[in-house]
């Protein structure tokens, strides 16, 4: 009985020692951290480590040994903003790590001065003294003359039809009316554009 009791006590002591050793190792593993400093050159940079927000622009944090996912987001609303993804590899304990990131924004070419130059150039050139205005006026005169010419011919042919009742004459009247209508429609488009330019310039 005494031997069994002693063995039982030894087993309990062994279990306690094992628990103490495991706890000690776990505590040592948890204390295996390094100081990590992350610096950016952008005051709008939001720093995330392992999907957790840490700080803006600059961060100091203690990280355990291993790999950690870093994401830096430019939270500004500027064009060409830059985001960064990286992996922080912490290889040793009780060591200082420094990471620096350039958050310089991508520069896009500015077309604004050229646009202003184009607008100013168009403003200085009056539409009514331009070649386009002269072409539109000339084409309006031609289209008006063509429409009137085919309309007069169609009216004369219709008078002939009333006398002869010839079906082919009536078909020719329809054809001449069609030509006159097309020319008149183009003339209306021409005048419409001229009126638009007159009201907008």
Image: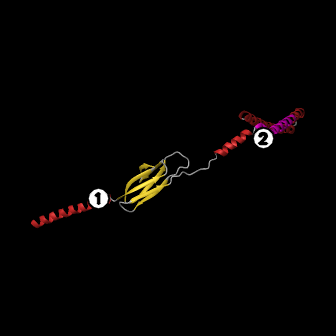
Q: Residues within 10 Å of mark 2 (few under 14, many from 20)?
A: few
Measuring from the top left, give residue 128's x and y in whole percent: 77, 36
Where on the picture, by quarter, is residue 64?
bottom left
1 or 2: mark nearer the eye: 1
* Mark 1 or mark 2, earlier in chain: 1
Q: 108 left or right of 162?
A: left
Q: Is residue 193 above or below residue 14?
A: above
Measuring from the top left, give residue 143's x and y in whole percent: 82, 38
The verdict on residue 146 being magenta is yes
Q: Pointers 1 and 2 in contact (CB under 8 A)?
A: no
Q: Camera-side residue: 43 or 143?
A: 43
Q: What residue occupies the far left of the structure in this picture?
A: 1
Where does label 1 land, which residue?
A: 27
Q: 26 left or right of 67?
A: left
Where does label 2 land, which residue?
A: 132
Residue at x 40%, y 56% (from the top left corner): 36
- CA gap between label 1 and label 2 equals 86 Å
Quadrant holding the C terminus:
top right
Where on the picture, by quarter, is residue 195?
top right
Quadrant holding the N terminus:
bottom left
Residues drawn in magenta: 127-152
Q: Camera-side residue: 105 or 137?
A: 105
Label 2 secondary element: helix
Measuring from the top left, give residue 88's x and y in whole percent: 43, 58
- In this orientation, does residue 198 appear? yes
Q: Which mark is residue 70?
A: none
The verdict on residue 133 being magenta is yes
- In this orientation, does residue 178 appear? no
Q: Residues within 10 Å of mark 1 (few under 14, many from 20)?
A: few
Type of secondary structure dominating the magenta stretch? helix
């Amino acid at each position: 009985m005494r031997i069994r009791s002693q063995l039982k006590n030894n087993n309990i002591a062994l279990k306690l020692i094992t628990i103490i050793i495991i706890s000690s190792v776990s505590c040592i593993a948890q204390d295996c951290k390094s100081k990590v400093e992350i610096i950016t050159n952008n005051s709008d940079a939001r720093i995330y480590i392992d999907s957790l927000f840490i700080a803006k622009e600059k961060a100091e944090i203690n990280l355990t040994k291993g790999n950690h996912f870093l994401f830096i987001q430019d939270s500004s609303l500027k064009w060409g903003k830059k985001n960064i993804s990286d992996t922080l590899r912490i290889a040793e304990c009780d060591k200082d790590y420094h990471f620096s990131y350039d958050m310089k924004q991508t520069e896009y070419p500015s077309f604004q001065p050229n646009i202003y130059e184009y607008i100013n150039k168009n403003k200085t050139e009056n539409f009514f003294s331009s070649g386009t205005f002269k072409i539109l006026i000339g084409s309006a005169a031609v289209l008006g003359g063509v429409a009137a010419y085919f309309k007069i011919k169609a009216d004369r042919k219709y008078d002939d039809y009333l006398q002869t009742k010839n079906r082919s004459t009536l078909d020719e009247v329809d054809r001449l009316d069609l030509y006159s209508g097309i020319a008149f429609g183009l003339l209306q488009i021409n005048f419409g554009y001229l009126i638009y330019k007159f009201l907008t310039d």
